[in-house]
Image: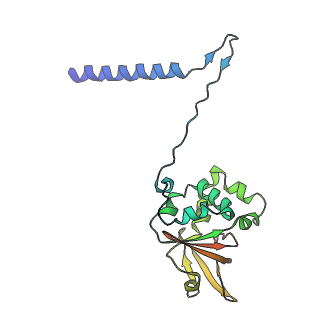
Amino acid sequence: MKITTNLKLFVGSLFLLTSMVSCKNEAKTGASGEAQSTTVKTETKKTGQAFITDDESTPNVLNIAIGSKDHTTLVAAVQAAGLENALVNAGPLMVFAPVNAAFDALPEGTVATLLKPENKNDLANILKYHVTPGNYSKEFLKKFKKLGQANNQSVVVEVKDGDVYVGGAKIIASIPAGNGIVHVVDKVMLPPTE
Protein backbone atom coordinates (compact mmCIF):
# COMPACT_ATOMS: atom_id res chain seq x y z
CA MET A 1 0.00 0.00 0.00
CA LYS A 2 2.80 2.38 0.98
CA ILE A 3 4.68 1.65 -2.29
CA THR A 4 1.55 2.42 -4.33
CA THR A 5 1.07 5.73 -2.51
CA ASN A 6 4.73 6.67 -3.03
CA LEU A 7 4.49 5.74 -6.70
CA LYS A 8 1.37 7.88 -7.12
CA LEU A 9 3.13 10.81 -5.42
CA PHE A 10 6.18 10.38 -7.66
CA VAL A 11 4.11 10.21 -10.87
CA GLY A 12 2.01 13.18 -9.75
CA SER A 13 5.13 15.22 -8.94
CA LEU A 14 6.67 14.34 -12.29
CA PHE A 15 3.47 15.41 -14.10
CA LEU A 16 3.35 18.70 -12.16
CA LEU A 17 7.01 19.44 -12.89
CA THR A 18 6.55 18.68 -16.60
CA SER A 19 3.49 20.93 -16.75
CA MET A 20 5.32 23.80 -15.06
CA VAL A 21 8.28 23.54 -17.42
CA SER A 22 6.00 23.38 -20.47
CA CYS A 23 4.06 26.45 -19.37
CA LYS A 24 7.24 28.37 -18.68
CA ASN A 25 8.65 27.62 -22.14
CA GLU A 26 5.55 28.79 -24.07
CA ALA A 27 5.91 31.99 -26.06
CA LYS A 28 4.69 35.11 -24.32
CA THR A 29 2.43 37.50 -26.15
CA GLY A 30 3.01 41.23 -26.24
CA ALA A 31 0.47 44.06 -26.20
CA SER A 32 -0.09 43.66 -29.94
CA GLY A 33 -1.03 40.01 -29.46
CA GLU A 34 1.94 38.75 -31.52
CA ALA A 35 4.13 36.05 -30.10
CA GLN A 36 7.52 37.17 -28.93
CA SER A 37 10.29 34.70 -29.53
CA THR A 38 12.66 33.82 -26.77
CA THR A 39 16.14 32.81 -27.77
CA VAL A 40 18.01 30.53 -25.44
CA LYS A 41 21.74 30.57 -26.02
CA THR A 42 23.56 27.47 -24.95
CA GLU A 43 27.30 27.41 -24.83
CA THR A 44 29.08 24.12 -25.18
CA LYS A 45 32.03 23.94 -22.85
CA LYS A 46 34.97 22.24 -24.43
CA THR A 47 36.44 19.64 -22.15
CA GLY A 48 39.46 17.42 -22.19
CA GLN A 49 43.20 17.69 -22.08
CA ALA A 50 43.35 19.82 -25.24
CA PHE A 51 41.73 22.73 -23.44
CA ILE A 52 44.06 22.88 -20.43
CA THR A 53 46.40 25.85 -20.64
CA ASP A 54 50.02 25.29 -19.71
CA ASP A 55 52.80 27.80 -20.28
CA GLU A 56 55.63 25.61 -18.97
CA SER A 57 55.55 22.30 -20.87
CA THR A 58 57.00 21.69 -24.31
CA PRO A 59 54.19 22.43 -26.80
CA ASN A 60 52.37 19.34 -28.06
CA VAL A 61 51.53 18.78 -31.73
CA LEU A 62 48.21 20.63 -31.39
CA ASN A 63 49.86 23.64 -29.68
CA ILE A 64 52.39 23.85 -32.51
CA ALA A 65 49.65 23.87 -35.16
CA ILE A 66 47.60 26.44 -33.24
CA GLY A 67 50.64 28.70 -32.91
CA SER A 68 51.44 28.59 -36.65
CA LYS A 69 50.01 31.20 -39.02
CA ASP A 70 50.61 28.68 -41.84
CA HIS A 71 48.27 26.07 -40.33
CA THR A 72 45.03 27.98 -39.63
CA THR A 73 43.04 25.83 -42.06
CA LEU A 74 44.38 22.64 -40.47
CA VAL A 75 43.45 23.90 -37.00
CA ALA A 76 39.94 24.81 -38.19
CA ALA A 77 39.60 21.30 -39.66
CA VAL A 78 40.83 19.63 -36.45
CA GLN A 79 38.31 21.67 -34.45
CA ALA A 80 35.45 20.90 -36.88
CA ALA A 81 36.26 17.18 -36.64
CA GLY A 82 36.50 17.35 -32.83
CA LEU A 83 39.98 15.82 -32.79
CA GLU A 84 41.70 18.28 -30.43
CA ASN A 85 41.97 15.82 -27.56
CA ALA A 86 43.37 13.08 -29.81
CA LEU A 87 46.29 15.32 -30.78
CA VAL A 88 47.35 16.02 -27.22
CA ASN A 89 47.53 12.46 -25.96
CA ALA A 90 50.85 11.13 -24.70
CA GLY A 91 51.80 9.77 -28.10
CA PRO A 92 54.30 9.72 -29.51
CA LEU A 93 52.62 11.02 -32.63
CA MET A 94 53.90 12.07 -36.03
CA VAL A 95 51.56 14.60 -37.58
CA PHE A 96 51.99 15.43 -41.25
CA ALA A 97 50.64 18.98 -41.16
CA PRO A 98 49.59 20.50 -44.51
CA VAL A 99 50.13 24.24 -44.82
CA ASN A 100 47.26 26.57 -45.73
CA ALA A 101 48.45 26.67 -49.37
CA ALA A 102 48.03 22.87 -49.54
CA PHE A 103 44.37 23.21 -48.58
CA ASP A 104 43.98 26.08 -51.05
CA ALA A 105 45.24 23.79 -53.82
CA LEU A 106 42.29 21.41 -53.34
CA PRO A 107 39.39 21.78 -55.78
CA GLU A 108 37.28 24.85 -55.06
CA GLY A 109 34.71 24.29 -52.32
CA THR A 110 36.35 21.12 -50.95
CA VAL A 111 37.42 22.60 -47.63
CA ALA A 112 34.12 24.42 -47.07
CA THR A 113 32.22 21.19 -47.78
CA LEU A 114 34.40 19.13 -45.44
CA LEU A 115 33.99 21.66 -42.61
CA LYS A 116 30.19 21.18 -42.59
CA PRO A 117 28.91 19.22 -39.56
CA GLU A 118 27.35 16.52 -41.75
CA ASN A 119 30.82 15.72 -43.16
CA LYS A 120 32.54 15.42 -39.78
CA ASN A 121 33.34 11.70 -40.22
CA ASP A 122 34.86 12.18 -43.68
CA LEU A 123 36.94 15.09 -42.39
CA ALA A 124 38.10 13.08 -39.37
CA ASN A 125 39.14 10.21 -41.68
CA ILE A 126 41.24 12.56 -43.82
CA LEU A 127 42.87 14.15 -40.78
CA LYS A 128 43.63 10.77 -39.18
CA TYR A 129 45.34 9.82 -42.44
CA HIS A 130 47.86 12.55 -41.54
CA VAL A 131 48.76 10.98 -38.17
CA THR A 132 51.12 8.08 -37.47
CA PRO A 133 52.16 6.59 -34.13
CA GLY A 134 55.86 7.23 -33.51
CA ASN A 135 58.39 10.00 -33.39
CA TYR A 136 60.73 9.64 -36.35
CA SER A 137 62.91 12.30 -37.88
CA LYS A 138 62.78 13.07 -41.57
CA GLU A 139 66.10 11.23 -42.02
CA PHE A 140 64.87 8.14 -40.19
CA LEU A 141 61.69 8.08 -42.31
CA LYS A 142 63.90 7.41 -45.36
CA LYS A 143 64.20 3.82 -44.09
CA PHE A 144 60.45 3.18 -44.40
CA LYS A 145 58.41 2.09 -47.41
CA LYS A 146 55.01 2.49 -45.73
CA LEU A 147 53.54 3.89 -42.53
CA GLY A 148 50.38 2.79 -40.74
CA GLN A 149 48.11 5.76 -40.23
CA ALA A 150 45.62 6.49 -37.43
CA ASN A 151 42.68 5.82 -39.78
CA ASN A 152 43.87 2.19 -40.17
CA GLN A 153 45.20 2.71 -43.69
CA SER A 154 48.80 2.87 -44.83
CA VAL A 155 50.66 5.56 -46.68
CA VAL A 156 53.68 5.20 -48.98
CA VAL A 157 57.01 6.80 -48.05
CA GLU A 158 59.34 7.76 -50.91
CA VAL A 159 62.70 9.48 -51.21
CA LYS A 160 63.23 11.69 -54.27
CA ASP A 161 66.41 13.72 -54.71
CA GLY A 162 67.08 13.44 -50.99
CA ASP A 163 63.63 14.76 -50.02
CA VAL A 164 61.10 12.64 -48.12
CA TYR A 165 57.55 12.33 -49.47
CA VAL A 166 54.75 10.78 -47.44
CA GLY A 167 51.60 10.01 -49.41
CA GLY A 168 52.92 12.26 -52.18
CA ALA A 169 53.38 15.20 -49.77
CA LYS A 170 56.90 16.58 -49.39
CA ILE A 171 58.17 17.16 -45.86
CA ILE A 172 59.35 20.79 -45.89
CA ALA A 173 60.08 21.21 -42.17
CA SER A 174 60.02 19.22 -38.94
CA ILE A 175 59.24 20.58 -35.49
CA PRO A 176 59.76 18.50 -32.33
CA ALA A 177 56.79 18.46 -29.96
CA GLY A 178 56.23 17.34 -26.38
CA ASN A 179 54.25 14.32 -27.59
CA GLY A 180 55.94 13.60 -30.93
CA ILE A 181 56.87 15.58 -34.01
CA VAL A 182 55.13 17.78 -36.56
CA HIS A 183 56.30 17.25 -40.14
CA VAL A 184 55.12 20.22 -42.18
CA VAL A 185 54.02 19.05 -45.64
CA ASP A 186 53.18 20.83 -48.88
CA LYS A 187 50.11 18.76 -49.83
CA VAL A 188 46.91 17.41 -48.29
CA MET A 189 47.10 13.62 -48.32
CA LEU A 190 43.81 12.05 -49.34
CA PRO A 191 43.21 8.49 -48.17
CA PRO A 192 42.53 5.92 -50.90
CA THR A 193 38.89 5.08 -51.33
CA GLU A 194 38.08 1.46 -50.72
Q: Position of residue 49 (x, y in %)?
A: 46, 56
Would residue 64 be found to the left or right of residue 188 on screen? left
The answer to whether residue 160 is visible is yes
75 relative to 186, above or below: above
**Res 194 visible:** no
The residue under the point 59% across, 69% down is 129
Residue 23 position in % (x across, y down): 51, 18
Left or right of residue 103: residue 132: left
* Quadrant assignment for the N terminus: top left
> Where's residue 29, x and y in %?
64, 14
Q: Nearer the viewer, residue 114 or 8?
A: 114
Extreme-right residue of the structure: 108
Check the picture and name the quadrant holding the C terminus: bottom right
Which residue is at 55% across, 67% downward? 151
The vertical placement of 67 against 47, above or below, is: below
Q: Residue furthest front?
A: 56
Residue at figure coordinates x 46%, y 53% from the top left: 48
Can you tell which quarter of the image residue 125 is in? bottom right
Q: Nearer the viewer, residue 173 or 38?
A: 173
Q: Quadrant of residue 146?
A: bottom right
Foreground residue among 135 and 190:
135
User: Image quadrant of residue 106?
Assistant: bottom right
Point out residue 85 in the picture as x, y percentages from the top left corner. 50, 58
Rendered residue at 55%/78% (across/down): 147
Number of numbered discs overlaid on the protein picture:
0
> How are the colours assigned in the image?
rainbow
